[in-house]
Image (cartoon, rainbow, N blue to C red):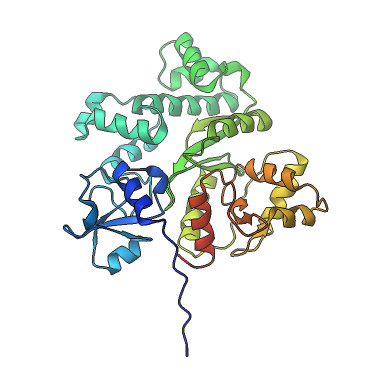
Amino acid sequence: MLLMSRPRPSLPPRDTMLDAFMRGDAAYEGIFFTGVRTTGIFCRPTCPARRPRPHNVVFFPSAQEALASGFRPCLRCRPLEPAGATPGWLRSLLERVEADPSRRWTDADLRALGLTPERVRRWFQRTHGMTFHAYQRARRLGLALGRIQKGGGVAVAAFEHGYDSLSAFNEAFRRVLGAAPSTVRDARRVAVRRIATPLGPMVAGADERSVLLLEFHDRRALETQVRTLARRAGCTFVPGDNDVLRTLEDELRAYFEGGLRRFEVPCEPVGTPFQQAVWRELRSIPYGETRSYGDVAAALGRPAAVRAVARANGANRLAVLVPCHRVVGSDGRLTGYGGGLWRKQRLLDLERGAV
């Protein structure tokens, strides 16, 4: 019996990869891994280790191929872990924060755990765009908002979550959540966290019913997307976690491992009636297949609306769940993708069994 070999994902030109590796370009996370002949170690493109001589560097499309070629994973950048995963040295702290999110952690508390406050701050700034202490404040305010929305008074919520004065609580609430506590009692509270994937961290947002946001963390339009979503859905975003986000994380892991072809986690695409019609059509594209923008427009009964379909495709805030990556140009070429064309190619490679 003849066995069909799986297609091998293509790599960029060597000069391009070498330049990206030497610069530590995060845009190439997931596209290639680097092996260093003199050390026998393979790394991510963004590894902080000292750069080797170019002629000693080889490139691989996957960690599996690097391992098969005899290279061992770097202990600094940990290429076998999903990009953006919480490092081992920080997990204990995050588990403690989640176990008691109302606690106020000080630098002395961090040192007592054997952690350097500066190192913790750098990781939070790089990963969440805020310091650890700012993250704690946002987390506490999110809990306070939940307390208020369940019928609790503003003053009670303030004191229960570590604020000694109501004025300080109100000021912190406005600064972080953009409104006074009394004005967001009926706002939809959406928990937001990062989920590590092989293509880089994704920002996910969900309430207790459904996923409203899933985007790659470095998408340029992410802040605009979040503001638009907050306005249209009448929601407030706060750091946190819930069962929907945990289900999403499990399904994303299975998808990237090649074991999931259809997502079951409930999601809620928020947009105009036309946008929602386009997104429903995108979700009908079978796993492993693609359609052109013209195909989608024709399926909607509006063959002349190709540009409008492209705009709706770009406005999708549920990457991967609503598979806008399955839409290509009429000639089969890859066209715009908010997460970067390299990610679009890798998602298509994954679905056709090339990775």
The part of the image, by quadrant, that contains residue 355 is bottom left
**On the rendered structure, is 199 left or right of 282?**
left
Q: In this view, which residue lies farthest toward the right?
A: 301
**On the rendered structure, is 100 left or right of 268?**
left
Q: In this view, which residue lies farthest toward the left?
A: 38
Of the pair 239 and 203, the residue shown nearer to us? 203
Q: Residue at x 37, y 37 (%)?
A: 99
**On the rendered structure, is 249 left or right of 289?**
left
Of the pair 138 and 272, the residue shown nearer to us? 272
Q: Position of residue 19 (x, y in %)?
A: 33, 47
Q: In this view, which residue lies farthest toward the bottom?
A: 1
* Residue 300 visible from this viewpoint: yes
Q: Position of residue 129 (x, y in %)?
A: 41, 30
265, above or below 110, in the image: below
**On the rendered structure, is 35 left or right of 180?**
left
Q: Residue at x 63, y 33 (%)?
A: 229
Q: How many numbered dots are placed on residues in this image?
A: 0
Q: Position of residue 304 (x, y in %)?
A: 80, 49
Of the pair 177 and 25, the residue shown nearer to us? 25
Q: Position of residue 44 (x, y in %)?
A: 32, 51
Q: Residue at x 57, y 63 (%)?
A: 261
Q: Residue at x 48, y 51 (%)?
A: 342
* Residue 265 visible from this viewpoint: no
